[in-house]
């Protein structure tokens, strides 16, 4: 047996073990009572706890891991050809059908929301499960076509640029074509693919709101690779190769991936698309090898709440099935030295004997430094509060002054006021009434646009604290911070360099990952000098 085979088999088994480990939780979420009005519903908060007054359609994507496990003849898979698993998957598809709106859309966070993302996730999962289970249900086909028409119209044109949603809609529409044979959906998928490919930046990334987000890029790669696997449409090969080349730069030495330096602050890494594309670029397998190591060491991110973890469960099982066996066993970081500056994405990656570092220039130098595969610094920006209770932050996408050489990075920027967004009982009731009495009659994008402006793309008011950050890229052994208080009347009560905060609402940001254990840096010791002189300095030395 060659030295390449054993690690490959071990790698493949990790996918299976990780995917199947979630099945007890998956089967706990579903209403298994045939007499129940909510039989097949995976939203436990709705059918069991009754803390929600509507079912979130996103949960119904759980039918896909059930269908995959039912048909997967593999060691240690107790769900293979277990009829109860198939029954629950079919019940889940049926509940998705019955709980959808008249136009085929489903809700996610709010009633009458008609969320494109949740609709596309559930439609893809239901149509994929339908194929895997070899079903023949005319009612299901009618439901798929109705939902496909919604996604081909309002769904694809949702407000904000979310490339991963667009890629998923393309995949879902092609799946509707495969199960119904209706050429309309194939044509729609092809036309929308042309549009999505036109959005790809020359650096390889696809936009997510205000820029590049490596975590969500892996979803876009995944969906387009799945589309290629089904359609054999070769026009996506080179765009996918470029996207994988870009994404590979953000696989950290310890196998963790992405983070707060992305436009959406996500740590996602879904491997199936990389396995599919490994035959076309060695970077795909080398990147996913690093991720598989993180599975073993526990360094990958974990976002295991009921709403999100299902994305990963079926992806791991699909990666197991499509595992690319003719792979190099090595990792990305062996004996490599490089500096990669992506000016369009405003991201900088530095790798050398001194360590690996990645920074967002648009967010004022938010980034991470690794020493010998160990996270030595997680700098997610300034966080503070005045004596009057005004909160301020620095990690906002905004123009910055940047000086970059081979050996040094200098970033200067401003801070911005921040206010938390929370529901009170009165606001919650008022918003519910708005959704029930008004929003249900508006185009879905009208409500979505409003929520984006309030919680995601809201503009910040400038705060009179400026800073300069200097990082020696040749040694990566310290970071120098200089602060300038522009208003002598402002008195700061707290000032921190946060290791893991995020301040825009993204459902899949803020998972658990080992970087959460890094302490925030308390800068209270420099506040007297800052108040007295209007400027102060702080050096953080990396151990």
Image (tube, rainbow, N blue to C red):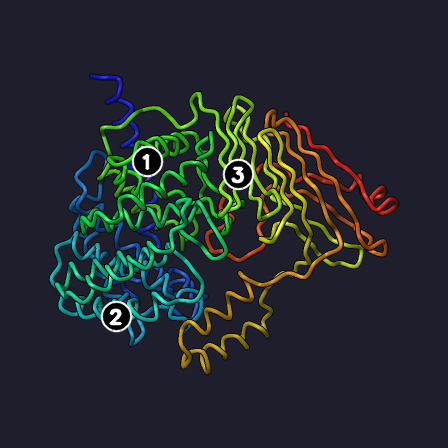
Total of numbered circles in the picture? 3
How far apart marks 3 and 1 lie (CA) works out to 21 Å
Q: Earlier in the sequence, mark 1 or mark 2?
A: 2
420 sits left or right of 295 in the view: right
Question: Vertical placement of 449 versus 170: above or below?
Answer: below
Residue 148, position in %: x, y?
A: 25, 67
- Residue drawn 60% across and 62% down? 459
Residue 457 left/right relative to 47: right
Bin the neighbour count of mark 1 within 10 Å (Cα to Cα): few under 14, some 14-19, many 20 and up: many
Disc 1 from disc 2: Cα separation: 34 Å
Depth check, mark 2 against mark 3: the one in front is 3
- The answer to whether mark 1 and mark 2 are in CB contact below 8 A is no
Q: Establish if 33 lies above or below 37.
A: above
User: Mark 3 vs mark 1: which is more N-terminal?
Assistant: 1
Q: Is residue 123 left or right of residue 351?
A: left
Q: Residues within 10 Å of mark 2 (few under 14, many from 20)?
A: many
**Quadrant of image for the N terminus:** top left
Secondary structure, mark 3, is: strand
Label of residue 284 in the image:
1
> Do callouts 2 and 3 mark residues in contact (Cβ within 8 Å)?
no
The image shows residue 181 at horizontal and vertical percentages of 12, 63
Element type at mark 1: helix
**Which residue corresponds to the image point at 45% horizontal and 63% vertical from the top-left?**
160
Q: Label 2 vs label 3: CA separation? A: 41 Å
Cβ–Cβ below 8 Å for labels 3 and 1?
no
Q: Can you tell which of label 3 and label 1 is closer to the viewer?
A: 3
Give percent across and percent down for residue 87.
19, 57
Image position, residue 220 (x, y; %): 35, 50
Q: Which mark is residue 149?
A: 2
Residue highlighted by disc 3? 348
Is 379 on the left-hand or right-hand side of 165? Answer: right
């Amino acid at each position: 047996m060659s030295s390449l085979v054993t690690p490959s088999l071990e790698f493949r088994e990790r996918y299976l073990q990780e995917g199947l480990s979630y099945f007890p939780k998956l089967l706990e979420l579903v209403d298994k009572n045939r007499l129940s009005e909510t039989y097949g519903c995976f939203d436990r908060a709705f059918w069991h706890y009754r803390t929600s007054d509507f079912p979130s359609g996103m949960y119904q994507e759980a039918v896909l891991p059930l269908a995959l496990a039912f048909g997967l003849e593999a060691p240690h898979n107790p769900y293979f050809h277990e009829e109860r698993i198939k029954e629950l998957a079919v019940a889940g598809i049926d509940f998705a059908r019955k709980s959808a709106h008249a136009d085929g859309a489903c809700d996610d966070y709010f009633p009458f929301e008609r969320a494109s993302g949740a609709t596309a996730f559930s439609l893809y999962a239901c149509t994929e499960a339908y194929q895997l289970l070899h079903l023949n249900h005319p009612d299901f086909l009618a439901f798929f076509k109705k939902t496909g028409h919604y996604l081909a119209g309002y769904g694809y044109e949702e407000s904000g640029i979310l490339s991963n949603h667009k890629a998923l809609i393309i995949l879902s529409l092609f799946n509707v074509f495969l199960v119904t044979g209706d050429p309309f959906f194939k044509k729609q998928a092809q036309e929308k693919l042309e549009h999505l490919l036109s959005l790809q930046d020359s650096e390889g990334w696809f936009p997510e709101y205000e820029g590049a987000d490596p975590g969500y890029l892996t979803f876009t790669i995944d969906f387009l690779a799945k589309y290629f696997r089904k359609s054999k449409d070769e026009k996506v090969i080179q765009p996918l190769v470029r996207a994988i080349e870009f994404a590979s730069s953000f696989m950290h030495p310890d196998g963790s991936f992405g983070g707060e330096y992305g436009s959406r602050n996500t740590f996602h890494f879904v491997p199936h698309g990389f396995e599919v594309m490994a035959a076309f670029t060695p970077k795909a397998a080398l990147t996913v090898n690093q991720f598989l190591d993180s599975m073993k060491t526990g360094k990958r991110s974990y976002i295991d709440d009921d709403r999100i973890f299902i994305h990963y469960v079926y992806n791991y099982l699909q990666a197991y099935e499509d595992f690319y066996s003719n792979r190099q066993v090595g990792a990305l970081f062996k004996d490599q030295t490089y500096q990669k500056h992506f000016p369009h994405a405003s991201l900088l990656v530095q790798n050398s004997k001194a360590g690996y570092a990645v920074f967002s220039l648009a967010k004022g130098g938010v980034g991470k430094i690794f020493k010998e595969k160990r996270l030595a610094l997680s700098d997610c920006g300034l966080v503070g509060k005045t004596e009057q209770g005004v909160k301020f932050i620095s990690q906002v996408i905004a123009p910055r002054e940047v000086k970059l050489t081979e050996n040094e990075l200098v970033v200067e920027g401003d801070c911005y006021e921040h206010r938390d967004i929370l529901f009170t009982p009165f606001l919650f009731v008022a918003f519910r009434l708005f959704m029930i009495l008004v929003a249900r009659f508006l185009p879905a994008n009208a409500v979505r646009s409003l929520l984006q402006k309030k919680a995601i793309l809201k503009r910040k008011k400038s705060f009179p604290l400026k800073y300069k950050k200097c990082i020696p890229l040749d040694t990566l052994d310290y970071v120098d911070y200089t602060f300038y208080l522009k208003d002598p009347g402002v008195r700061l009560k707290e000032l921190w360099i946060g290791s893991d905060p995020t301040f825009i609402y993204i459902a899949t940001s803020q998972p658990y990952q080992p970087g959460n254990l890094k302490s925030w840096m308390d800068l209270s010791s420099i506040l007297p000098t800052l108040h007295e002189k209007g400027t102060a300095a702080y050096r953080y030395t990396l151990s």
